[in-house]
Image (tube, rainbow, N blue to C red):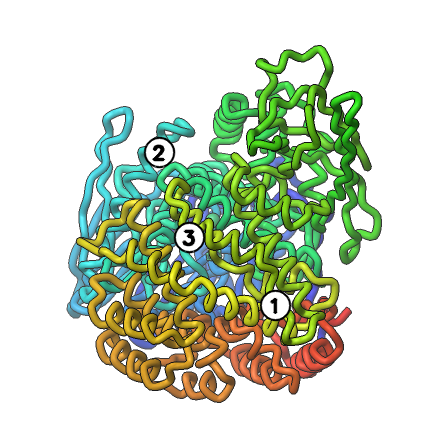
């Protein structure tokens, strides 16, 4: 066991920083065995802080070489230094502090601070990585102007980058050179970045709305030179969009993007120098799928948007993380929605939220969008802070309407430019600009847990009225036993007999021609009743249109009603939702039926209509044809029996695929034509539909399907088609073809890490191919690397997160496997280790056969001596 318990940090203990930094001057000497960092900080006491406090700087695994105060070297007795802090008891009100540290980027496997990735030096400082570089007040409310000088061997590291503008460069002795960068914008240390490597530069240009020319530059390893176009095009789209939609113009003269292979997260918004995980930025049609292209577009935009929502206006402390992340995710979802199919984008976001975020909100790690305590902040880069945080901003947008929301955002940026602020400041700007009172709404930031809405209705034939009664309850979560009702925008429509959206008259005098067909009802109490007038017959309610709030809705739709909504609801999101509810209901009911009970024919009819319907957005059709995932079905059950869910789902899949065989072949052929690869929404939709049909066919070992898959695999002109064919074969029972395709694919792409990651993930997430033995074998594969987070995610992460029927093997072998890997990883990369614990944390959600094994895996983790703070927090909270 860990000898001491890690400290918990509380929001209520926040105090302003005792010292401020006006200027941070850094000099990096980069060598093959380490790096020397010289830092000179111009500091002064914070006038808002209590007088006489000692100076205490944060550090992490630092070796101190020297300290000087106002140019005078200090001796041992003048300060107290450990690898984790530097303390000087008496300092003047204003002073300059010079510190030299020695660090070892080459041995840095945590990938926080300065580290090496495939031969280049790079940094990751959010949230608390800067303290691994030098002693510093490493908190976001300390903002300084940075000047950075980098010195390194010229031939190994011709490119030297940091934030801001490139002000000087030159040669040094011994084949070394240097570059100096100056960032005119004060920033917190978490936005600092440095890169040194042998990289190629791709250049582009952007002219801002006010006519300023911005140099856009992308830096990648030479082998990736042909994979930059998409990111640069996405960047320019994002820059224009932010000007048009938010009135935000870029502020420096240069904007740089760097791709690195070893990265804990997706990407990082360092000022003027965004650093990306290669898999989230590099793409070419030959190597990246449509999904990857779309993901890259949204991540490039996300990081760019942070320049305003995050960098110009930053967070006061890490409890406010959603201030920048929730808002920026909201901005990137609006952007993606404008660039593609809004309905499909909404479906993707909502299904992630409903499966993964709802699970988090219902488990032992549940926390509010603005948490009020943490042990390790890295554990709080969560779906709740990001995705639920985004939904909270979206609800403000819905409640205020687009104009007032924009006024609120303008006021927020104007009022807080250059400041480190709180989520409350954000909400206040929205209130002040709109005149709306959001005091109850603030509970969305403070209360954890997913609100549940229970809806009842009543139709009065004689009066022609229809009443909806909505009850709200917010479940208890760890540390929050009692909840208050929240302010929920609940968008509804009513669909009439002919499938028409009816005018919604909330009073008898309202003119039917003035009444809208969608209304956003505002729920604020435990329960509300709304009466709609002038109805000739009982309507079918379309509830929570567009997923207007991150809540669960219970309403007893009949299967006939769901089929009706699937083909008539004017709200595309709810059409999809109806398809999922219908399929879930059918699958769930089969779980308790003998094997010979057939699937409800209505589901078959609904799918047959869908396959034939060419009037609908084909991207939506492709989505609706996908059965709810095992993860979604687990989330919907009280206590989950994974194997029973998996079996029932397979039964439905098999039966439908057999019956729909001809329709699927026809659908495939109709969408087969694949001329030149274009990334247009229609083409993406066509590929998605075709590949969905292919997957269904192969699921039932259809011979024609097999032939089509092999042909598509061999003849594919793009990675979307190739990887889909591979996935379909891997998930099929055609074992010979499966192995052949896997071998060919690897042979062709083994030099490309991003493609190899897909190859790993397709196998590890497949219930057919990805047996535990096979996954163990992948870990021994020549391309696997325990130091590379992407590889870990694509094998261990994909197995535990997506291959649920294998991971939840009743003998507990999947859990033991995961625990063993986490224990080993905890030594090298605790952040990644802690993330991998997540599939075990919800053990209470599962039937005993599963939960006992999950719990005992957690106990194995708990018993490791010197567990990292990261893993400690997740494990202990889960076992509580
Ligand atoms: N701030 C990054 C983003 O969301 C995510 C990140 C967090 C990256 C922590 C690295 C470390 O854009
Ligand atoms: Zn972000």
Mark number, residue 598: 1
Pick the front one: 252 or 475: 475
At x 33%, y 62%, the residue is 278
- Residue 157 image point, x, y percent: 22, 65
Q: Is residue 374 above or below residue 461?
A: below
> Residue 677's quadrant in the figure?
bottom left
Quick check: 203 left or right of 863?
left
Contact check, label 3 and label 2, Cβ < 8 Å: no
Q: Which residue in the structure is indicated by mark 2?
A: 241
Q: Is residue 278 above or below residue 468?
A: below
Number of residues whose C-alpha sits closer than 10 Å to that of mark 2, classed few (under 14), some (14–19) or many (20 or more): many
Q: Quadrant of the C terminus?
A: bottom right
- Residue 573 image point, x, y percent: 53, 42
Q: What element does badge 1 sit on?
A: loop
Q: Which residue in the structure is indicated by mark 3?
A: 611
Number of residues whose C-alpha sits closer than 10 Å to that of mark 1, classed few (under 14), some (14–19) or many (20 or more): few
């Amino acid at each position: 066991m860990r000898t001491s318990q890690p400290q918990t940090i509380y929001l209520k203990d926040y105090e302003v920083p005792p010292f401020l930094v006006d200027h941070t001057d850094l000099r990096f000497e980069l060598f093959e065995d380490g790096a020397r960092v010289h830092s000179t900080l111009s500091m002064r006491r914070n006038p808002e802080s209590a007088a006489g406090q000692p100076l205490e700087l944060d550090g992490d695994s630092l070796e101190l070489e020297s300290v000087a105060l106002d140019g005078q070297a200090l001796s041992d007795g003048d300060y107290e230094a450990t690898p984790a802090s530097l303390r000087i008891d008496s300092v003047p009100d204003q002073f300059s502090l010079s510190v030299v540290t020695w660090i070892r980027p080459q041995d840095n496997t945590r990938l926080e601070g300065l580290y090496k990735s495939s031969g280049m030096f790079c940094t990751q400082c959010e949230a608390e990585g800067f303290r691994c570089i030098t002693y510093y007040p490493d908190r976001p409310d300390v903002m300084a102007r940075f000047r950075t000088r980098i010195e390194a061997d010229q031939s190994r590291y011709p490119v030297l980058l940091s934030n801001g503008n490139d002000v000087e460069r030159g040669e040094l002795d011994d084949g070394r050179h240097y570059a100096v960068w100056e960032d005119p914008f004060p920033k917190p240390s978490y936005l600092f970045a440095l890169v040194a490597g042998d990289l190629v530069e791709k250049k582009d240009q952007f002219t801002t709305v006010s006519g300023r020319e911005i140099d856009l530059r992308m830096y990648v390893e030479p082998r990736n030179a042909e994979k930059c176009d998409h990111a640069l095009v996405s960047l320019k789209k994002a820059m224009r969009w932010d000007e048009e939609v938010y009135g935000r113009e870029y502020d420096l003269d240069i904007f740089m993007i760097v791709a690195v292979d070893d990265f804990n997260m997706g990407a990082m918004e360092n000022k003027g120098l965004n650093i990306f995980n290669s898999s989230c930025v590099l793409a070419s049609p030959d190597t990246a799928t449509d999904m990857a292209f779309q993901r890259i577009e949204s991540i490039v935009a996300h990081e760019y948007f942070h320049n305003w929502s995050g960098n110009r206006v930053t967070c006061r402390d890490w409890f406010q993380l959603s201030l920048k992340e929730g808002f920026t995710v909201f901005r990137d979802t609006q952007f993606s929605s404008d660039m593609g199919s809004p309905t499909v984008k909404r479906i993707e976001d909502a299904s992630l939220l409903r499966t993964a975020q709802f699970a988090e909100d219902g488990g032992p790690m549940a926390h509010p969008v603005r948490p009020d305590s943490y042990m390790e902040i890295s554990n709080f880069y969560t779906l709740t802070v990001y995705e639920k945080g985004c939904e909270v901003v979206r609800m403000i947008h819905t409640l205020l309407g687009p104009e007032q929301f924009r006024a609120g955002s303008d006021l927020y940026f104007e009022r807080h430019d250059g400041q480190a602020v709180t989520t409350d400041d954000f909400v206040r700007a929205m209130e002040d600009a709109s005149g709306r009172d959001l005091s109850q709404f603030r509970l969305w930031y403070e209360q954890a847990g997913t609100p549940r809405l229970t809806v009842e209705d009543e139709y009065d034939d004689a009066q022609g009225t229809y009443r909806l009664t909505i009850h709200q309850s917010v479940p208890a979560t760890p540390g929050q036993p009692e909840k208050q009702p929240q302010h929920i925008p609940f968008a509804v429509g009513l669909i009439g007999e002919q499938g028409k959206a009816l005018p919604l008259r909330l009073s008898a005098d309202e003119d039917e021609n003035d009444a809208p067909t969608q209304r956003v009802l505002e729920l604020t109490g435990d329960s509300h009743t709304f009466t709609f007038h002038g109805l000739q017959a009982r309507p079918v309610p379309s509830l929570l249109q567009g997923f207007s709030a991150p809540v669960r809705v219970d309403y007893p739709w009949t299967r006939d009603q769901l089929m009706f909504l699937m083909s008539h609801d004017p709200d595309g999101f709810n059409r999809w939702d109806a398809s999922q509810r219908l399929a879930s209901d059918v699958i769930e009911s089969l779980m308790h039926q003998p094997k010979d009970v057939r699937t409800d024919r209505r589901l078959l009819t609904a799918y047959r209509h869908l396959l034939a319907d060419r009037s609908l957005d084909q991207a939506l059709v492709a989505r609706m044809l996908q059965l709810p995932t095992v993860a979604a079905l687990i989330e919907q059950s009280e206590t989950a029996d994974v194997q029973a869910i998996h079996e029932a789902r397979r039964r439905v899949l098999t039966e439908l695929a057999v019956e729909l065989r001809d329709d699927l072949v026809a659908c495939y052929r109709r969408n087969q034509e694949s001329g030149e690869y274009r990334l247009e929404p229609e083409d993406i939709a066509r590929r998605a539909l075709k590949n969905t049909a292919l997957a269904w066919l192969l699921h039932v070992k259809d011979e024609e399907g097999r032939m089509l898959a092999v042909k598509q695999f061999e003849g594919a002109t793009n990675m979307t088609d190739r990887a889909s064919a591979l996935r379909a074969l891997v998930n099929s029972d055609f074992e010979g073809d499966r192995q052949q395709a896997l071998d060919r694919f690897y042979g062709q792409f083994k030099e490309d890490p991003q493609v190899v990651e897909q190859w790993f993930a397709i196998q590890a997430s497949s219930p057919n191919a990805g047996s535990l033995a096979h996954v163990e074998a992948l870990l021994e594969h020549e391309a696997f690397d325990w130091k590379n987070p992407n590889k870990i995610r694509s094998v261990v992460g994909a197995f535990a997160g997506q291959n649920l029927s294998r991971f939840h093997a009743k003998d507990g072998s999947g859990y033991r496997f995961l625990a063993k890997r986490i224990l080993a990883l905890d030594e090298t990369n605790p952040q990644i280790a802690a993330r991998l614990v997540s599939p075990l944390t919800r053990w209470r959600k599962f039937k005993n056969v599963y939960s006992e094994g999950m719990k005992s895996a957690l106990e194995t983790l708990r018993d490791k001596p010197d567990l990292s703070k990261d893993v400690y927090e997740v494990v202990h909270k889960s076992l509580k």
